[in-house]
Structures are given as C-alpha cells and as structure tokens.
Amino acid sequence: MLKVGLILYSVRAEMEKNPIGTVEKVAGMGYKNIEVCNHNAIQDPGCGFGVDAGTLRQTFDRFGAKVVSAHVFPFEKSDMKAVIAYNRVLGNQNIVNPMGKFSTYDDLMRQCEDFNRWGKICREEGMTFLYHNHDHEYKTFGGKAILDIIAENTDPDYLSFELDTFWTMRAAVSPAEQMKKMGDRIRLIHQKDFAWDSMAPINTIGLTPQEREMQGEVGMDGNSSYAQKGGKFSQEQQDAARRIRNTAFTEIGTGIMPIQQIIDAANQYTAAEYIILEQDYTRMESQFASVQKSMEAFRKYTGISWDAD
C-alpha cells in the first residue's frame, strides 16, 4: 500500500517566507511523509532555505512526521558529501536528481555514467539515488525514449526512479504502462493532476516519431539562469507561464488524471513505497489552501495510507 506524502515544492513561496512555520503547518494538516525540495543546491546542501538539519528534524519529530525523500537541484553542482550528511541527520535515505538537460546521444551516455557514479557513492553511504522525470525524457533518440535509455544504461543497484505520472501522461505515455515496463526500478511516485479547463494542451512533445525525435536540447541543468538564481524564475518567465502553461494544474484529485488506476498500477508493478503529491501552481488564494484541498480530494482513493511508518 502506498503511503501518501507531500513535496515542499508545493508550498515553496511559504517556505521562502517562513520555512519552519511552513513545515509545522503542513505536518499539522496531516502530511506525515515529506519530500524536501532544494532548488538552491549550488549555495545550500540542505533544504534550500538555510535551515540546519537538526532544527528541521526536530520540527518534523514534534508532529510525528518524517522526511522520506529530498530533491537536490542542480545535483551536478551540489556538494554530495554535504548533501548526504544533511540527509542522514534528517533520517532520509532517498536522494533525487529532479531534472536533467540532454542534447546528443553521446552526452546522454556520459550522463548515464555520472548517474552510476553518483548512485554508487549514495549506495555506499546507505542512500538510494533516484532520477525524477519531466516530459522531455520522453523525447527519443532513434525512436527510443531518453528515460528508457537511461534505465537500460544504468545499474539498478545505483539508480532508481521517481516516476512523475503527470509529465508521463503529458508526453502521451500511459503512466500505468510505464510502471509495468520499469517495474521495481520505480521507488517513488509523483502525483499531480490535470485541469479539465486547461488552456494548455495535454500533449507536450507530439505524437509522430518525427515530432518526438530529439532536435537540439531539452531540460535544464546547473548552468540555467533558474539554477544560478537559486531556484527562481524571472518575473517575465513567471508571467508568461501563468497565462497559459500554469492553467494545466489543478488540485490533486479534482482533475482528469486516472489516479486510482495509477495507484493500482504502482501497487501492482513497482517497488514504490510513497506517492508524493506535488502542486506546481494553483489558482487558489494560497499554497496552504491548495495542499489542504488536495489532501481532502485525495482521500477518496483506495490502496493508500496517510500514516508515517
């Protein structure tokens, strides 16, 4: 049975204002399995908001909550030893590279070598290293998706996957079929929901082989302005996204994604222990209100548990 969690990216604006108060708020709501989200890893090996590990651990402990995973971006520019040390204090064993940038097939092969190397270091430290997909990992080289190429060219002992079902669906791939294909390489699930009244199309990368084949670059890495600014988009980028792209997101359990089917497939095919809710953007009055609504809407599904271990 999947345990339900929440990634703190869902309340990132609140984290920036008051990280400890935000953790207390979401844990008090009943989110007991938390994924921290550090998009400022160039400067901060911890949670991304300048909070020491001991203080953060004590806050979670007070509410009977725990950290079950950590996003670290840009991973390739982070201090791995410091990241591992921070997460050991938190009691967390899952370290996630949440985003990659890809260009040529040779570059992809080089990155697979990096994934194996980083994963080996994590494994030796008692940690599991995972890669989290977006839609661009379903672009293809020679008709084969980047995500599948990564799986085929990395050691299962050193790299697992956090499957984002929202971006999988938006790349015109069935999340359930992808879970069946990848099996127990999938250790975590990310769940969003797609709005019925979205101004943005569901499909993001096309349907024909020609449309899906790689041309140029996709994704984002530590050289992006977003990474260099500590996980912040420019106001111009935010405004442009809000007009169309952001309308695709709705509170989880209120949209059109086949979430029960996804939960059932995850329980049947994968080694995932947690399904982690993620709200990229909301039209509600606050991010707190958004994650509260998602919690209420998500309770209708079966095959899940809200408890911590």
Image (cartoon, rainbow, N blue to C red):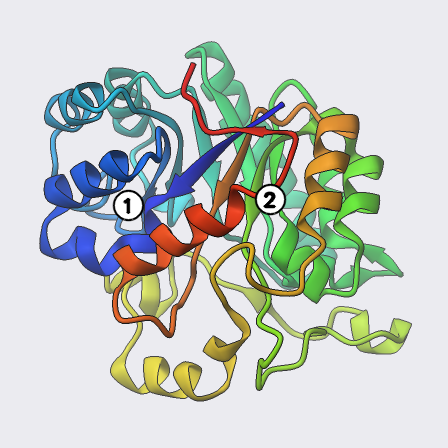
Determine the residue positioned at 75% across, 49% down.
175
Instruction: Report if residue 152 is visible in the image.
Output: no
Label 1 secondary element: loop
Residue 176: image location, x then y, percent: 79, 44
Amino acid type for the residue under numbered disc 2 = Gln
Which residue is nearer to you in this view: 218 or 87? 87
The residue carrying pointer 1 sits among few (fewer than 14), some (14 to 19) or many (20 or more) residues within 10 Å by Cα, namely many
- Against 139, is 68 above or below? above
- Against 176, is 138 above or below? below
Residue 36: image location, x then y, percent: 33, 38
Res. 153 image quadrant? top right
Amino acid type for the residue under numbered disc 1 = Ala
Q: Which residue is mark 2?
A: 111
Instruction: Report if residue 89 is visible in the image.
Output: yes
Q: Which residue is mark 1?
A: 41
Determine the residue positioned at 38% across, 66% down.
224
Label 2 secondary element: helix
Determine the residue positioned at 30% across, 29% down.
83
